[in-house]
Amino acid sequence: MTLITLRNALDEARKGGYGVGAFNVTDVLQVEAVLDAAARTSSPVIVQTIVGASAFASDELFWDLILRAISHYPDVPVVLHLDHGPDEESCRRAIDAGFSSVMIDGSLDRQTHQPASFEENVAVTARVVEYAHARGVSVEGELGTIGGSEDGSKHAEIVLADPEQAAEFVRRTGVDALAVAIGTSHGAYKFSSPPDGSVLHMDLISEIAGRVPGTHLVMHGSSSLPGDLRAVINTYGGTLPESWGVPEDEKARSTKLGVTKINQGMDSHMAFMAEVRRSLATDGLTADPAPALRAGRRAMTDLIAERMEVFGQAGHAGDYVAEPFHAVAR
Ligand code: 13P
């Protein structure tokens, strides 16, 4: 397995002038889909997952299976990243389980679902950085709050990142990467019309990048929410509302402005579930789940492979000559 750190992946991406997709997974089949897409396009890749987001009863079991899956792709440089770690303890659990990168999301008070204070965010992030860096693990922090919610259950308001605070946050925490709220939101409902500069603040990226030159910027909520996938889902029983996500060309442009990590989960889920729904609806005689899940996995691989070309990471797997994070043979 070639597990690498987020710092390693994003430093290389900056040198090469491209972005690296961080694809959310909630099942081992989705891990296979991401890794197959990376192998097909010769890409470095970030596999990311959220605490409690899988259908497994145990995070530790799921995480172990992800590491096993990664070991089957020796030619793919992979970052295993905890997305939106809700607290210090979750980040420690992931680090102890073998993740090469964690995000501590100290921007939101998990009790009230209101933005946390800047001082609280700095304090918890700095503690996670201390634990992680002592073990060679990278850390992503968050400034401002990204709207929506990772699992669709709550809808936090959007608070745009402040460039002045970004510089202070980075100086006081030592994060490797910073998620900056620029108007995007998580989930299957984002913009009510095609986004323009009044809702999607691309200008903020370069403004912040200029103040934190040694830190990588992360664009969250980057799914495009393709209308054709929504149509298939809704044809077969879904009720997804019409919505616009981040256009492909804006994602590509973000990598020229200073973004090196592009987070995307919902598009994968839509690609996967559109084909699962189609398969279930059109093949009433099969009770075995495998054909439907196989169709979902393949559709997700195809979508991610396309995105890897857009982000620019395709063809760059061979660039990674740095020491692997650890040679795991678990
Ligand atoms: P989407 O909800 O747009 O897929 O974004 C995922 C994300 O940012 C995870 O952190």
Image: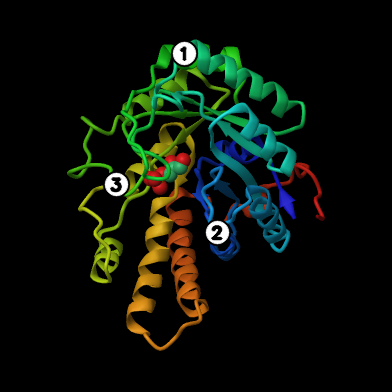
Q: In this view, does 125 lie to the left or right of 289?
A: right
Secondary structure at badge 3 equals loop
284 relative to 254, above or below: below
Where is residue 39 drawn, in percent x and y? 60, 63
Reading the image, the residue beneath label 1 is: 118
- Indicate yes or no: mark 3 CB to ligand 1 under 8 Å: yes
Q: How crowded is mark 1: few (under 14 residues within 10 Å), some or many (20 or more)?
A: some
Q: Residue 27 carries which label?
A: 2
Secondary structure at badge 1 equals helix
* Residue type of the residue flagged with mark 1: Phe
Q: Residue 245 carries which label?
A: 3
- Is there CB contact under 8 Å for labels 2 and 3? no
- Is there CB contact under 8 Å for labels 1 and 3? no
- Mark 1 or mark 3: name the one nearer the start of the chain: 1
- Is there CB contact under 8 Å for labels 2 and 1? no
Can you tell me which quadrant of the image ligand 1 is in? top left
Question: In the image, what residue occupies the spot 41% across and 16% down?
Answer: 163
Extreme-left residue of the structure: 193
Where is residue 218 drawn, in percent x and y? 47, 34
In this rendering, the label closer to the viewer, 1 or 3: 1
282 relative to 58, above or below: below
